[in-house]
Amino acid sequence: MLHKIESQRSSRDERGFSLIDTLVVVAIVGLVAAIAVPQTTSMMSGYKIKGNAQAINNQVGLAKMRAAAQFSRARLYADLNARTFRLQVWNKTTNQWVDDSGVTPLADGVTFGFTGVTQPPPNTQAAIGQSPLCTNNAGANIANTACITFNSRGMPVTNALPPAGAVTGNSGLYVTDGSAVYGTTVSMTPLIKAWWSPARDNAWVPQ
């Protein structure tokens, strides 16, 4: 009798999972994936744009320090079409802008812009917009660019060549992925601030 019971138990164990069991497991895995994948994609997109925004903010702060340390001018140069940015310093000996960092590209899906946001962060720009056009070594404007420039005292200035260039509080760079907008602004004080807002809204939050 004992041998018969053990034989029946062994027979049941050897059957494994039925087709219904397998289908139930597959359905559960599919449901979990359907919920998790969009959330993961959204999180990754958020990390990308936030990383770009932090890098821009850090480079603006570094440009300010470079200008003061080298008693010259320094700027964050953004190529709006190429979706890249880099730090440059004015070489007073050769009278030209020189790259002080490598070219950093924006992440996939991130562009310079402010998708539907119509108002600047509070107590910053008069109207929302990217910083003025960058200038070349001869002082001519470069199309589809934006520069945040500092003089040797670490003050944000217009892009006119040294020794010209007035102090300005209208500096800002904005990036968006279509769902959020991050911005870096520089006041005349000069105070560098980071901001975030949902796209197509005017709900700026300091970062």
Image: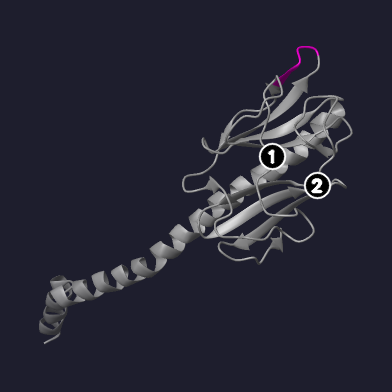
Which x, y percent locates residue 82?
Answer: 51, 35
Residue 33, which numbered label?
none
Determine whether the residue tagged by mark 2 lies in a helix, strand or loop: loop
| Residue under pointer 1 | 132
Colour approach in the figure: one colour
Give the quadrant of residue 99.
top right
- Is 94 covered by the magenta stretch? yes
Instruction: Name the residue at the top extreme.
Output: 94
Query: Mostly what secondary structure, the magenta segment?
Result: loop
Residue 10 highlighted magenta (yes or no): no
Under mark 2, the amino acid is Gly
Residue at horizontal 72 percent and vertical 53 percent from the top:
194
Quadrant location, the N terminus:
bottom left
Give the structural element (helix, strand or loop) at label 1: loop
- Label number found at residue 169: 2
Question: Looking at the picture, how far across and down is residue 137, in whole percent?
Answer: 70, 20
Query: Viewed as shown, does residue 139 lie left or right of 36?
Result: right
Give the residues in magenta: 93-97
Q: Where is residue 56 in the image (x, y as percent from the top left)?
A: 66, 42
| Three-letter code, disc 1 | Pro
